[in-house]
Amino acid sequence: MLEFPRWKVWLIGIVIAIGVILSIPSLLAGTPAAGSWPKWLPQYKISLGLDLAGGSHLLLEADAQDAQKQRLQAMEDSVATELRRDPRIDIGDISTAGGRLSFLVRDATKVDAAVERMRGLTKPLALTGNRDWDVSVVDSTRVVLTPTANGSVQALKDAMGVARDVVRRRIDPSGTKEITVLTEGGNRILVEVPGVEDPEALKKLIGQTARLEFKLVDQSANPADLQQGRAPPGSQVLPLADGTGAMAVKRRVMVSGDQLTDAKQSFDQDGRPNIDITFNTAGARRFGRVTQENVNKPFAIILDDKILSAPNINEPILGGRAQINGNFTVQSAHDLAVSLASGKLPVKLNVIEERTISAELGQDSIHKGVIASVISVFAVIVFMLVTYGRFGVYANIALVVNAFLILGIMAMFNATLTLPGIAGFILTIGAAVDANVLINERIREEIRRGRRLIDAVETGYHEAFRAIFDANVTHVISAAIMAYFGSGPVRGFAVVLLIGVVTSVFTAVYFTRMLVALWIRRARPRELHI
Amino acid sequence: MKLLKLVPDHTNLDFMRWRNVALVLSLIATIISVGYTIYHGLNLGIDFVGGQVVRVEFAKPVHIDDLRTRVDQLGVGEAVPQSLGNDRTYQIRLPKPTGADSASNQIVSKLRTTIPQIYPGARVDAGESVSGKVSEELAQNSAIAIALAMIGIAIYIWVRFEWQFGVGALLTLAHDIAMTLGFFAFTRLQVDLNVVAAFLTIVGYSLNDTVVIYDRIRENLRKYRKMAILPLLNLSLNETLARTVVTSLTVMIALGILMAIGPQVIFGLAIAIFLGVLIGTYSSIYISAPVLVWLGVEPDSFLKPEEKEEAEVQPV
């Protein structure tokens, strides 16, 4: 007991010093003293959870129907492009009904050639040996492409990866904010943004697919058919964005948002907000060619299958620049510009869970939590002092050191402190002294049994350790399960409990043992007042 | 300085004398608790049944009936407003809408934009929406987590002690959780994810006392091989009584302060753990220990055969 080698004293001292140093930047954060912390010391900080810092937690789920629709549309575009390469294959009656893509080959002798080209569009899937689309022929002239189940899963997975990057670019175009964007479970994206002022704007930004297309207006459609939603062959009926009617447009896409290099909010000649877009080289060339061929005809600017506007082509647009007009406010034009510049979402995302806390409310929680923590520590300290005297002082020193160590370790791992985490901190304060209570009560007991002082202290520490160990393992089991299953705030609670278990065993057992040993060696007490 | 001794030296209470009375009472309390919970159900928060909650800070005092009527008029379901301490801060809960999973969130969006229009100067401080799908998953995960924690800990106790102790720990846990559930059913306090975290904590912490007492029983079983089981349990309980009282008090002091002045959001968590510790203190004495008697633990149960023989031939 009394042999406490010098190196052990140093080691314990160094561990504690490091813990305290690591915890200070987090304690200073937000106070005027924050700037006075020397730059050459560690700067690790505990991050605050959304419930304390304020912010939005959003869980987004891919819209399965929309995913299928977009996949069909993309396939339709590539089918049209592919078959245009062989002018002898004349097709008609393209349909996407029933979740399948099918078209009629007018010349029956060209069916095989068409099927061959279609096969080239499908991709093999890794490991399974299947392809992502099945190609078949019905009624000897109709080619049918059916998405396979595995292909759809793979496509969704790929789409989610792209969607995650798009969402990140939209929320944080400059890439400087501390946001979290993660894919979860194959069809979900978790978004956590601290310090959100306007959660509705944030959701709008993420919720918009932003698929921009330029298509020629089909002027041959007669109004009666339009009313019925029927369009001439090769065309489709789309609604106007302002809800005032519908228009027939060619199915074939002139240029799409994929060919943008930039989009910026700007103003038109009349001072109304609009969006300036710039095409890449291929897009600019195509846009130039189509406008050249269709002077004095209208074309439609389509966003997410709604027609924003349908201006007339007065002259060929050759520079690769265009303006998008619509009923925009400065804010909505700006948001759409950000969405266009970050690319379209390959799948529509729905918010299936939201938890938003304002910064003021978070600040209030921190304030109340800190006061409760300080008073708890103080109350426990007084209680320990009147119960165990000198040994209570040791337990209290251990308690304070423990508090610093928990914060220091959390800072080192950049762990997140949440509101339940503060509760975990207070619980740990209350429970951490348990080890000292066990030890001290055992020492009292051994003295009652007539053991000599040093012997009693030795036995007390030795015998109590078993129970301390077993009790702490049970805490670890429940906290680890909580950390695994819990989300956000609850995980923060579990992390504090886990760290607290480790640090409290260190401070309550090893550190107080050192304090007691040094005291006994120095003071050589005859009897123990405990 | 005279030190505080809550439990006097040489305390010798005959705990086990009342073990059957305590058992009957615990059993009745557990049955009532479980029955009440099943019959009346828990006041589940949106985490587990889906729905929406917004917290609003109004510029001027607002009457709760006025607020209810006006939110009801929005046609987003029956509003349940609740004052948070004063007549300017309210929490409004709305039931989960039928339809797509995204419908739930649209209601929060609607409230966020329309409440400041109805009540100028009002500020929506917090908004939460949990769709049916997510709430089902959360409820399922919570149940799995609690079950896993209970089983995991019981297995650990079994491995470290003997199987009888593992069973004792599991029964103690089941009792503690049932009683706490009954408390939540009875008080209508809302059960949310934080409360589930508290239940998991109870699984760890209410067992604290049990582990300490079991450790002492194990030690005494080795030390006093000829002592009958009941006096041995009494001895172990009395020896650890001071520690049980002091530790439970420190934890309850810390949590009591958190309950009294801490943030309102974690009140449920704090009170659940507080209660769990209180119940755990009782059950470590009157469930964990007597269970060992019923499971037939005898002073020589855990001796190896050769030690047993030795113990038998030795004269007392």
Image (tube, coloured by chain):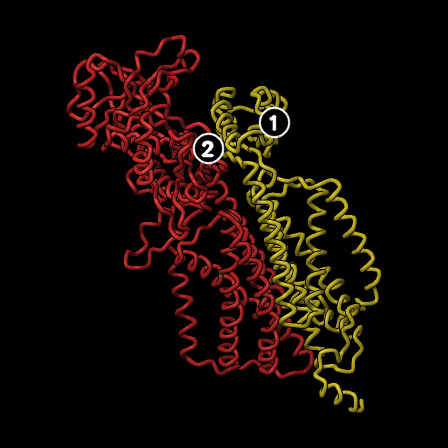
Chain colours: A red, B yellow
Q: Identity of the amino acid at label 1? A: Ala
Give me the C-alpha separation between circle 1 and circle 2.
32 Å
Residue A65: mark in rendering = 2
Identify the subunit bearing mark 1: B
In this rendering, is residue B56 above or below A248? below
Could you tell me which quadrant the C terminus of chain A lies in? bottom right
Could you say whether the residue bearing mark 1 is in a helix, strand or loop?
Answer: loop
Q: Identity of the amino acid at label 2? A: Gln
Which residue is more in the foreground, A484 or A399?
A484
In this rendering, is residue A221 above or below A1? above
- CB atoms of marks 1 and 2 within 8 Å: no
Identify the subunit bearing mark 2: A
Toward the left, the furthest residue is A319
* Circle 1 Cα neighbour tier, 10 Å, few/some/many (<14 / 14–19 / ≥20): many
Q: Picture coordinates of residue B154 (x, y %)?
A: 65, 64
Q: Is B43 placed left or right of A339 in the picture?
A: right
Which residue is more in the foreground, A204 or A310?
A310
Write down the residue under mark 1: B79
Q: Is B313 placed left or right of A224 in the picture?
A: right
Taking the image as drawn, is residue A190 in sight?
Answer: no
Q: Residue at x 32, y 23 (%)?
A: A251
Q: Is A456 placed left or right of A56 in the picture?
A: right
Do the residues marked 1 and 2 share a common chain?
A: no
Res. A315 image quadrant: top left
Could you say whether the residue bearing mark 2 is in a helix, strand or loop?
Answer: helix
In this rendering, is residue A197 above or below B23? above
Q: Picture coordinates of residue B284 (x, y %)?
A: 71, 63
Which residue is more in the foreground, A212 or A90?
A90
Taking the image as drawn, is residue A292 in sight?
Answer: yes
Q: Residue at x 63, y 57 (%)?
A: B203
Q: How many marks?
A: 2
Which residue is more in the foreground, A221 or A62?
A221
